[in-house]
Image: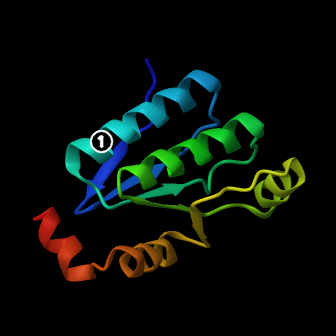
Amino acid sequence: MERIPILKMGQFLLVTIQVDLYDRLALDLEADLIKQISEYESRAVMIDISAVTIVDSFMGRILNNIASMARILDAETVVVGMQPSVAITLVELGLPLAGIHTALNVERGIALLQSKVGTDRRTLQSNND
């Protein structure tokens, strides 16, 4: 069974989506992420969608669900690497993406999350040692 890998980086979880998500894979990602946020007491989730070229309302709803559930578990969510065509589609679909922070790339996403959860780069590095 195919799974999207979730990497633990200190208090953060990193997801890099390199394939187009079909419904079952998206639902599994949602469940896996929520489980790992709870298990690792993660403070933030970064979802890199730079390789995603197509989104639909289901994918938008999954992102909203992840952000809502993460917020309930006291974690922030940032989506990075969104291509312009994906942003246009999300706006045209009228998806609000409530509770989701966005950043242009991974580096800016890490800086945003560090400002949101009050951690710094040294904390990230020491937690990975």
Q: Position of residue 53 (x, y in %)?
A: 73, 48
Looking at the picture, tell me which residue is in the foreground, 105 or 116. 116
Q: Which residue is mark 1?
A: 36
Identified by mark 1, the residue type is: Gln
Q: Residues within 10 Å of mark 1 (few under 14, many from 20)?
A: some
Decide if residue 76 is on the left or right side of residue 92. left
- Residue 57 sits above or below residue 125 on the image: above
Q: Position of residue 129 (x, y in %)?
A: 10, 65
Residue 42 falls in image quadrant = bottom left
Element under disc 1: helix
- Residue 94 sits above or below residue 104 on the image: above
Decide if residue 57 is on the left or right side of residue 48. right
Q: How many marks?
A: 1
Which residue extends farthest front? 72
What residue lies at 38% left-to-right and 40% top-to-bottom? 34
- Residue 18 sits above or below residue 117 on the image: above
Looking at the picture, tell me which residue is in the foreground, 3 or 91. 91
Decide if residue 88 is on the left or right side of residue 58. right
Q: Position of residue 30 (x, y in %)?
A: 48, 36
What residue lies at 43% left-to-right and 29% top-to-bottom? 3
What residue lies at 40% left-to-right and 82% top-to-bottom? 115
Chosen colour scheme: rainbow
Q: Position of residue 104 (x, y in %)?
A: 61, 73
What residue lies at 50% left-to-right and 54% top-to-bottom? 47
Which residue extends farthest top? 1
Image quarter in which the N terminus is found: top left
Decide if residue 48 is on the left or right side of residue 23. left
